[in-house]
Image (cartoon, grey):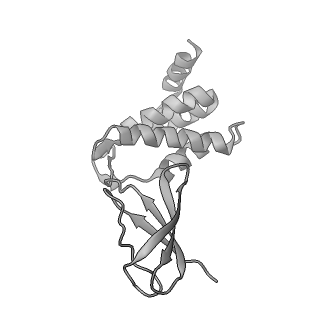
Amino acid sequence: MAEDILYVYRKGRYNEKMKCPYCSNPDTRVVDSRPADDGTSIRRRRSCDACGKRFTTYEKVETIPLIIIKKDNTREQYNRRKIENGVLRACYKRPVPAEEIERMTDRIETRIFSLEEKEVPSNVIGEMVMDELKRIDEVAYVRFASVYREFKDVNTFMDELKKILN
């Protein structure tokens, strides 16, 4: 039997009137509840009182869409993947495990959302990424900084290296 999985995104109180995906009956009951996705959501096994079929729902907190203000003042929706891609490029052929990149991205994302702002300038995020990279791998830090700070010549590159060496 194929199991249907519903994703329930909502704020506030637990909704006890979840409709059955098979027969649309509003009377379902929770059979089992447990944390999922490292505690960021709750997995609930449910049973329909009418047809008896079981299904799974995931409950997550609804987040406010975050807007990133780019250097040219254009705005775009926050995209975690962009941070991951930037860090991956900086760490290319470096001894940084994928798990560490994931944890670093999680820490950066937590810091971004803890600002509790609807709009965040991209330079704030860039500085957060550089702080994390500096702790993890200095070569990856310099790679990221050279692109992020748009080094124009060797002297500005050397100035950044001197900051690390001191």
Q: Residue 150: tell me if it is visible.
A: no
Q: Eyeballing the image, is 13 above or below 132?
A: below
Q: Image point 50% across, 64% down: which residue? A: 44
Q: Along the line of sight, which residue is nearer the eye, 79 or 8? A: 8
Quadrant location, the C terminus: top right
| Residue 75 as seen in the image, left or right of residue 52 | left
| Residue 60 as seen in the image, left or right of residue 90 | left
Instruction: Please state the total of marks drawn on the protein image.
Output: 0
Q: Image point 29% across, 51% down: which residue? A: 74
Position in image of residue 29 (x %, y %): 45, 71
Q: Eyeballing the image, is 18 above or below 109?
A: below
Q: Image point 48% across, 86% down: which residue? A: 22
Position in image of residue 158 (x %, y %): 54, 21
Q: Residue 21: tell me if it is visible.
A: yes
Quadrant location, the N terminus: bottom right
Q: Eyeballing the image, is 16 above or below 123?
A: below
Q: Along the line of sight, which residue is nearer the eye, 19 or 58? A: 19
- Furthest-top residue in view? 166
Position in image of residue 54 (x %, y %): 54, 77
Position in image of residue 83 (x %, y %): 49, 46
* Residue 19 in which image quadrant: bottom left
Q: Image point 49% across, 57% down: which residue? A: 42
